[in-house]
């Protein structure tokens, strides 16, 4: 298992984003395939490297796109001393513009990246919620969706504060902008706290304990708590989870609590960062999202040096991810 002890704060931030994008890109080519089809395409071990998707190798999906816009909104909020939920909501409007949405005011610089103006299987819940112009909140939900579109983009919220309760609350609030079911936005809160704790040098099991404590303070937490506890128990058994076990025990990852649980299980069971990403994508479900979340966790813990160089070299927009990570590190003092 790779040690987190020597990983600097700046490197951990960069690695969290890059490893999340690598997991996203690995899973993007098999997102809608069941494990028997994956094995039929790639052999008994399943996917072991990038496969073509969206006309290239290493293509990111909407998961990484929205993660980047989340981070840009937070950077602008910290610079301006403005409301982070507002700035993230406006940033999502810019992402929507890249997906053919209405014209918006130029802000930040992500809107000027041509490659981000690509449609990469964006989630219907995110598109519908943002197109509505309504502001979803925890107190006034915009819908009853618990899809994984809120948790998949939540890792950058870990930057916002040294306090787990503040990180959880902000991640839940930004998640509720588009996803109104507790398991949709509370999974975002859990992920952000896990990443925050890993950045601070905690072991993953300790980070789970902190996130679990925060989760239980929120109404409607029971469904997420059951799967988080199950994933943690399975991941500490020392038994390598198979794709079939993942699906039977935790589901396909299409909804928030399942996607987070699969990421936690595979991160705990991983022998290396690369091994964890392959565990996280080789199953019958939402492979790009579970790969992205596992990557966020293991990248935050292990650092960019744990990522295979050939995956980074082929990763779409690796330079953009690195530039935004460096900018965020400066603004947040990491």
Image (cartoon, rainbow, N blue to C red):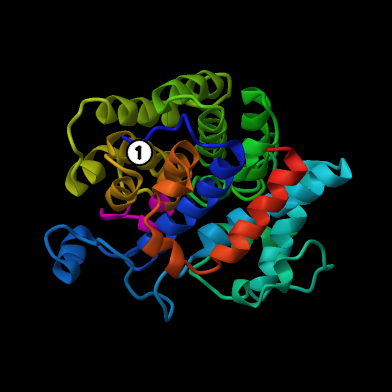
Camera-nearest residue between 224 and 297: 297
Image point (45%, 70%), residue name: 59
Please say if 42 is above or below 215. Answer: below
Image point (87%, 40%), residue name: 81
Which quarter shows the N terminus? top left
* Disc 1 residue crowd, few under 14, some 14–19, many 20+, Cα 10 Å: many
Residue 219 highlighted magenta (yes or no): no
- Which residue is farthest bottom? 55
Q: Position of residue 44 (x, y in %)?
A: 11, 60
Residue 285 highlighted magenta (yes or no): yes
Q: Position of residue 118 (x, y in %)?
A: 57, 75
Q: Is residue 334 visible?
A: yes
Which quarter shows the C terminus? top right
- Which residue is farthest front? 6
Image point (61%, 30%), residue name: 168
Q: Is residue 326 left or right of residue 82?
A: left
What is the magenta range?
281-291
Give the residue at mark 1. Answer: 267
- Local secondary structure at mark 1: helix
- Kindly indicate the quadrant of the structure image that contains residue 265: top left
């Amino acid at each position: 298992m790779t040690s987190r002890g020597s990983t600097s704060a700046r490197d951990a931030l960069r690695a969290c984003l890059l490893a999340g994008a690598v997991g996203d890109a690995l899973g993007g080519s098999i997102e809608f395939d069941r494990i028997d089809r994956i094995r039929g395409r790639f052999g008994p071990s399943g996917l072991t490297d990038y496969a073509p998707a969206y006309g290239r190798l290493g293509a990111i999906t909407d998961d990484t796109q929205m993660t980047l816009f989340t981070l840009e909104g937070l950077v602008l909020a910290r610079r301006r001393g403005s409301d982070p939920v507002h700035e993230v909501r406006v940033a999502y409007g810019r992402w929507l513009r890249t997906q053919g949405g209405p014209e918006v005011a130029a802000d930040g610089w992500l809107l000027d990246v041509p490659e981000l103006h690509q449609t990469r299987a964006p989630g219907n819940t995110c598109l519908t919620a943002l197109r509505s112009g309504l502001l979803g909140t925890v107190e006034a939900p915009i819908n009853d969706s618990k899809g994984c579109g809120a948790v998949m983009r939540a890792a950058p919220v870990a930057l916002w504060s040294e306090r787990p309760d503040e990180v959880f609350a902000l991640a839940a609030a930004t998640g509720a902008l588009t996803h109104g079911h507790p398991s949709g936005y509370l999974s975002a809160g859990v992920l952000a706290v896990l990443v925050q704790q890993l950045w601070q040098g905690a072991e993953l099991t300790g980070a789970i304990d902190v996130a679990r404590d925060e989760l239980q303070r929120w109404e409607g937490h029971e469904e997420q708590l059951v799967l988080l506890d199950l994933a943690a128990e399975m991941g500490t058994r020392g038994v390598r989870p198979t794709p079939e076990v993942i699906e039977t025990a935790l589901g396909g990852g299409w909804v928030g609590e399942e996607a987070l649980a699969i990421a936690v299980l595979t991160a705990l069971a991983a022998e290396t960062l690369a091994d964890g990403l392959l565990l996280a994508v080789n199953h019958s479900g939402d492979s790009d999202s579970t790969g992205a979340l596992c990557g966020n966790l293991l990248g935050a813990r292990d650092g960019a040096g744990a990522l295979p160089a050939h995956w980074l070299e082929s990763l779409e927009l690796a330079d953009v991810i690195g530039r935004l990570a460096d900018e965020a590190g400066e603004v947040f003092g990491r």
